[in-house]
Amino acid sequence: MKTVVITGISGTLGQALGAQYVRKGWRVVGVSRKDDLEGEYFTDLLVSPQTTVEDAQKLLEYDPDIILLNAGQIETEIGEGGVPLSEMVESMNRVNYTWPALVCLEAAKLKRNRPLDVITIGSIADGSPSAFGPVYHAGKIAIHYFVSGVGPIVYHANRNIRMRHYRPGAIYGPLAWAPVNRLNEKGYQIRAKRVQGAPSADTVARKIVKWIEDGKEWVGTYEEPFSFKIFKYLFTLAPNFFYKLQLLGWRKGSKFV
């Protein structure tokens, strides 16, 4: 029986990914900070703080065929003026970037005679950071850069270990509303249109699982809105202009101005 380890198993996408693999007959090790989870989207539950090298090593003790580093944290608290809270910055960067990077590096040490895919789950926003979800976007940018930079080194050092990255877009549901605590009514309506038209978690999970099985791409991306593509290119090619757009966007879309 093949084994997949999925972090963030209690979340919208985590549950959908787990259910996909359970239906395929895999052993699904769900990783969570919660010790009271129930459901048909995992077969084993690993309760873990997901912070240290030792925590990363415990995932590898299951001898998995796939590790899906899906856990993520969104900005649910903000300070005066919409400024990110220091505590949230530390926590979100650990969950979204630092700990997944540790898992990747611990996996790179393994001596295996069969392949292991270590897949980080990012965001299409990693190429177009926004003033309305800045800490979240920063962590997703960081893990994407890490995988693209460290992945080739790991692969050529150990051909059975592949670090890959998948960038899903918005998913229909309450967790897709992360920026609303910074948006004014006009900005809220724009966000509502995008989220209400987003695919379900099951739809996204099916595509991710197929992408993993195909195994041809190192970085995968769900359908990306045209606006994200434009902002991504501006961020790369005209960073000063992009920053000015962020200044304008905050003035027009924030309820704090």
Image (tube, rainbow, N blue to C red):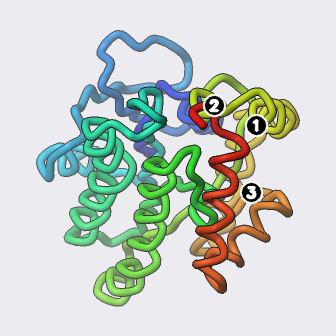
The spot of residue 52 in percent (x, y) is 15, 47
In the picture shown, does residue 116 fall above or below 195?
below
Which residue appears at 26% of the width and 51% of the height? 60
Crowding near the residue tagged with mark 3, few <14, some 14–19, many ≥20 C-alpha atoms within 10 Å: some
Q: Amino acid at mark 2?
A: Lys
Give the alpha-carbon distance from disc 1 to disc 3, as whole Å: 24 Å
User: Which marked residue is nearer to the observer: mark 2 or mark 3?
Assistant: 2
Q: Which mark is residue 187?
A: 1
Circle 3 sits in a helix, a strand or a loop, which is it? Answer: loop
Mark 1 vs 3: CB contact within 8 A: no
Query: Which percent across, then down, holds residue 213?
Result: 64, 60
The disc, 1 or 3, on the residue closer to the chain's N-terminal end is 1
**At 77% across and 27% down in the image, what residue appears?**
185
* Front position among marks 2 and 1: 2
Q: CA distance from mark 2 to mark 1?
A: 9 Å
Q: Which residue extends farthest front?
A: 257
Q: Secondary structure at mark 2?
A: loop
Evaluate if marks 2 and 1 touch, with contact meaning CB atoms under 8 Å apart. yes
Amino acid under disc 3: Tyr
Query: Tag 1 or tag 2, which sits nearer the N-term?
Result: 1
Q: Amino acid at mark 1?
A: Gly
Residue 36 visible, this orientation: yes
- Quarter of the image for residue 83 reads top left
Towards the viewer: 81 or 30: 81
x and y percent of residue 68 in the render?
A: 46, 49
Q: From the viewer's perspective, is residue 39 above or below residue 58?
A: above
- Determine which residue is flagged by label 2: 255
In the picture of the structure, the residue carrying the numbered disc 3 is 222
